[in-house]
Every structure is written in C-alpha cells, then in structure tokens.
Image: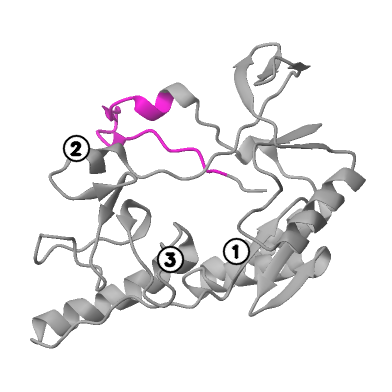
Amino acid sequence: MTLLQDLPRLLPELSEKLGHAAHKSLVARGVSVRIGTRASTVCEKGVLLSGNEFLSAATVLCTIGTRPNPLVERTLLTVERGRIVVNADLGVKDFAGLWAIGDCALVRNVRDGSIAPPTAQFAVAEARVLAANLLATLNGEPTRAFSYRSRGAMAAIGHRKGVAKLFGLQFSGLPAWLLWRAYYLSRMPTLGRKLRIFIEWTWGMFFPNDITHLRFTRSAELDLPPTIGPDESVKTARHAEAMTL
C-alpha cells in the first residue's frame, strides 16, 4: 500500500509532532508514505506521478478536501475562494437580512483574524452565533461578531489508531482514537442514536465490517439530475464522503 501526499508532511491541520506520529504509525504497519508527491493521472493500471513515474495499482482511493456548492458562484452575492463573503456577524455582505454559515460561507474569526475552516466544530459554533444574532435582530438589539477558540483537532489513522490535540494537549495511538470516537459520539443527537452508534462501534472493534451494508456512489452519479422513482419519491445522487487521514 502506498500513500501519496502532495504537502511536505501529513496532517497539516495538526501540529508537526502529530503529523510525524501519524507518518510513523502508518510506516510501522507497512504503508509506504511518499511526501511531496502528486498524482497527475489515474488509469485502470495505476497512477502516473507528476515526475512521470508510474505506480501499478489495482485499487486507487482519492481523498480530497471539501468545496462549496457550485451554485454559490452563480449567485449575485460577493464570492471569494468559491465561498460567500459574510460580515463579522455572519450577515451576507451587501445583502441585509441574508445570512450564511458553514462550508459555503467565508467566515472570518475575529478572535485571531483567521478564516474559519469548513469543519463540523466551527459550523456548530457558527450556528449558535447566528441563532443569537437572528433573535437579536428580531428584538432590535445589536448583533455580535463570530469569535471562537478551537478546542482542538483529531484524526483517525486506522483501526484503533489516531492522533489528537485537545486544549493544547497532544495524544496519539489508542487514546487518541478513543478520544476521537468519544467526541463524535457526544455530538450525535438523541440518546437512541448515541446508543445505536455506540453498539455498532463496539461491535466493529472486535469484528470486521459487513460490506453488504455499505453503499458506494460512482463519480458519474454526482452530476445526475434528480429522478422520480416508482414510488414517486425523489431520489438524488449522494455525495461521497471525504475521509481524512
């Protein structure tokens, strides 16, 4: 197995120490990690690298970052980097009464002046500020700017392996993997869903996944228009999830 990374190291979102820990963990499990290497072409026989080196491969998996919906760029709103530009209080620039948050919005964190990343942690924080600002607007009160301190970042790098940085503390290996799962489990709505996921995850720690329960979406399906099935329900193509090592 070969892992290609176009950047100087793995996990640039985390500290250099955790990036090296992830690199070391993968190599120890037999993964060939190639840093600063870009794939230029993928075909049925393998991958052609930017330096014209060819890697034979029967299976190629590609993980890419998120991108805003192309619809954003076709609007009359101010767009930068493919995302809707918003004011400090999350109101859309030059459009009073219109608000935007999440992956499609270019939100500046006034705490440090950085652009808020398109992650679930920041999306939830943005939603809470927006809800407060909507109520403030309805009551004729002043709105507040989006200011948020990241609680950290985590990543799973294989079964029972992970890296994490939480409130300045760094973890790797099984503790980080358990912390990663515990955090996401805590964010799930309703007790019933939490219990169901906990049971499934616990089962998965000791037994392999049942692949008959997995649904795969072909890339060509992503651009297909919605269709009406026999039951008159509208079916839309589902976007494939990006997995981050």
Q: Position of residue 104 (x, y in %)?
A: 32, 52
The residue depicted at 60 percent of the width and 21 percent of the height is 40
Q: Quadrant of the N terminus?
A: top right
Pinpoint residue 119: horizontal percent, then vertical percent. Answer: 48, 59
Q: Is-magenta flag for residue 232?
A: yes
Looking at the rendered structure, the kind of residue marked 1 is Arg
User: To which quarter of the image does residue 60 belong?
Assistant: top right
Above/below status of 188 relative to 57: below
Mark 1 falls on what kind of element?
A: helix
Specify whether residue 241 is painted magenta: yes
Q: Secondary structure at mark 3?
A: loop
Q: Write the start and end of the magenta stretch as one range.
A: 221-242
Task: Write down the residue under mark 1.
Answer: 196
Q: Quadrant of residue 169?
A: bottom right
Q: Amino acid at mark 3?
A: Ser
Q: Is residue 173 left or right of residue 43?
A: right
Query: Measuring 56% from the left and 76% from the top, which residue is drawn there?
Result: 151
Disc 3/disc 2 C-alpha distance (Å):
26 Å
Depth check, mark 1 against mark 2: the one in front is 2
Task: Note whether 133 is above or below 47 in the view shown.
Answer: below
Left/right placement of residue 103 relative to residue 184 reads left
Q: Are marks 1 and 2 in contact (CB under 8 Å)?
A: no
User: Between 96 and 81, which is closer to the camera in this rendering?
Assistant: 81
Separation of marks 1 and 2 at Cα, in angstroms: 41 Å
Residue type beneath disc 2: Arg
Marked residue nearer the N-terminal end (3 or 1): 3
Relative to the observer, which residue lies in front, 216 or 183? 183
Whichever of callouts 3 and 2 sits on the residue coming sooner in the sequence is: 2
| Neighbour tally class for label 3: few under 14, some 14-19, many 20 plus, Cα within 10 Å | few
Q: Which residue is mark 3?
A: 114
